[in-house]
Image (spheres, helix red, strand yellow):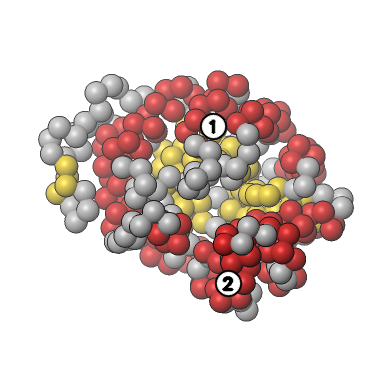
Amino acid sequence: MKFSLRFNNDLPVRDYVIYAQAAEAAGFDQFWVSNDLFLRSAPVILSAIACATERIEIGTCILNPYTIHPAEIAMFAATLDELSGGRFNLGLSSGAEDFIGWLGLDFDLPRTRIVESIHAIKKLTSNENAAAAGRVLRWTEEAWLRFEARRPASIYLGAMSPKMLEEIGAIADGGLPLLFPPEHYQNVLPHVERGTQRAGRTLADIDLAACIWCSVSEDQEAAEAALADKIAYYGHAMSPLILGQLGLRQEDFEPIRRAYHLEGDIDKARRMVTPRMLRIGIAGTAERLIERLEGLAGMGARHISFGPPLGPDIPAAIAAIGRDVIPRFGSQ
């Protein structure tokens, strides 16, 4: 079993360095940082982490080819892999249509754009010419890196929709499917397997991370409040497929979205998050976390990725997961 941590890019850079060092000491295998719009730059954060750690792998979760050109993504990937000594993983996906819309960009052909980008980035970081004549990418023969990449980019595909989940199995080195709730893994797996069958691969060829949200603390109320903050920010952008499993609709989050993003009233937004919405993640003690993770392990998960908010006290949450959870599942 592998273990990783995922962070939003909303904290001071120095905090990530501290948390990455703690994660490395606690036995985590990977450390991921998102690149959500108008927050801090994940490539910069990961550069700082690369210089302050020795073993732990680092990655973006995720970059998207709408706001960053795939050629530049390849440049980031190869440079960060060089800086980290071969520890960089490129988390890539189309992003959320709602957030891309903030910039007035058309969210067109997301699956095609991702598939073509992955092929191009693989070629560039394999030190090959990436000339392309696709539906989205139309590159000339001048499309090649002017420095030598250490290795082909290790690409993890972020996905929620059935078609994108299938592409994890078909073309990616790993997957970052968001599991809201964690039990959604049982629905994700058949789509990924369909992709492996299409490509003549097996699940063993892919590092499929079961990406959950959790908030770990001995203080149940504080744990739930921290998780509610994240749900208030992102809930409206979750897919109907995800929300439907919990009997929720995107419309249920509209008052929360308005309070958070339009009125700037975070406390009001948090208070509107219901117990049913909190089931999107796991909040409470390490023991409660283990109870829910037993189901994931039983479904065959071989990599558990713990995502934001992690807890009201992040260093304490990292320590608790490293002390209580990793030893419980590490031998599986």
Q: Is residue 220 visible?
A: yes
The residue at 54%/32% (across/down) is 45
Give the left or right position of residue 320, taking residue 62 as reference: right
Number of numbered discs? 2
> Where is residue 87 drawn, in percent x and y?
49, 29
Residue hosting label 2: 254
- Identified by mark 1, the residue type is Ile
Give the left or right position of residue 35, taking residue 300 as reference: left
Residue hosting label 1: 45
Q: Is residue 205 visible?
A: no
Near mark 1 (Cα within 10 A), the count class, few <14, some 14-19 or many ≥20, is many
Quadrant of the image occupied by residue 186: bottom right
The residue at 35%/57% (across/down) is 104
- Identified by mark 2, the residue type is Glu
Give the left or right position of residue 44, taking residue 257 as reference: left
Near mark 2 (Cα within 10 A), the count class, few <14, some 14-19 or many ≥20, is some
- Residue sitting farthest toward the bottom: 247
The residue at 82%/54% (across/down) is 222
Q: Are marks 1 and 2 in contact (CB under 8 Å)?
A: no
Quick one: label 1 or label 2, which is nearer the N terminus? 1
The secondary structure type at the circle numbered 2 is: helix
- Residue sitting farthest toward the front: 263
The residue at 28%/21% (across/down) is 147
Give the left or right position of residue 200, taking residue 193 as reference: left
Q: Nearer the viewer, mark 1 or mark 2?
A: 2
> Where is residue 309 drawn, in percent x and y?
68, 49
The secondary structure type at the circle numbered 1 is: helix
